Amino acid sequence: DAGVIQSPRHEVTEMGQEVTLRCKPISGHNSLFWYRQTMMRGLELLIYFNNNVPIDDSGMPEDRFSAKMPNASFSTLKIQPSEPRDSAVYFCASSLTGLAEQFFGPGTRLTVL
Amino acid sequence: EDQVTQSPEALRLQEGESSSLNCSYTVSGLRGLFWYRQDPGKGPEFLFTLYSAGEEKEKERLKATLTKKESFLHITAPKPEDSATYLCAVQSNAGKSTFGDGTTLTVKP
């Protein structure tokens, strides 16, 4: 298996632009997680899905952030409009069930100028 | 609110010098405690899961233990390739994961 796939790996955009991050989980995994990692705040859970349904989005910082999982093999995290404080590495992870260990993707490094 | 505190923030060891990393936690119903390793520029990589107090897991030079309030990651005779950031995470009965800030380990040859 190729593992969790994220795209793009790097994104540089200007404040106010829309940003869409993409994730393909490991085939057969039923849970998907979006995290944000910064030096100041560490690794923060933004939202997670079980069987394509959002279970807990309490970590989503603002209404500017939204996430979707239209099917078992694809998820998106959208930021609109983006702000410089959104600059971070965004990780997607998947697990076999919501209770199992998580497998992380390589991350998307987002820079908002 | 679930909380995870890891100590020390950074640890420098000589090759072969054993030590332990600490993870203290408070959680509303522990479903599991996880240890991950993160190398620079990469995503965290799973190491261990512990479910109940008294449980221990081992893998090569690493051994993880769990009590009702904390977990330890013991590193025996470390090598330079063990240098990384080690993350501890707890998962609550509600399924939510909370990560600590990590311990950055540097092993000098």
Image (cartoon, rainbow, N blue to C red):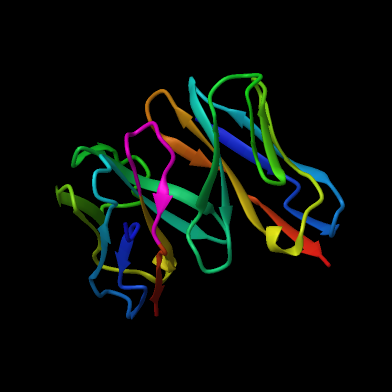
Residue at 52% x, 69% y is B41
Percent across and percent down for residue A102 are 41, 44
Percent across and percent down for residue A70 are 12, 50
Percent across and percent down for residue B96 are 40, 34
Residue at 83% x, 67% y is B109
Query: In this image, B10 relative to B45: left or right?
Result: right
| Foreground pick, B100 / B13 | B13
- Does residue A10 appear in the picture of this structure? yes
Query: In this image, B97 relative to B88: left or right?
Result: left
Quarter of the rendering containing residue A17: bottom left
- In magenta segment, residue B48: no
Q: In the rendered image of this protein, does residue B19 appear above or below residue A56?
A: below
Q: Which residues are magenta?
A: A94-105
Magenta segment, principal secondary structure?
Answer: loop
Query: In this image, B86 relative to A47: left or right?
Result: right
Percent across and percent down for residue B95 are 38, 30
Quarter of the rendering containing residue A112: bottom left
- Does residue A64 appear in the picture of this structure? no
Residue at 72% x, 46% y is B61
Residue at 49% x, 39% y is B98
Q: In the rendered image of this protein, does residue B10 appear above or below residue A9?
A: above
- In magenta segment, residue A100: yes
| Foreground pick, A106 / A113 | A106
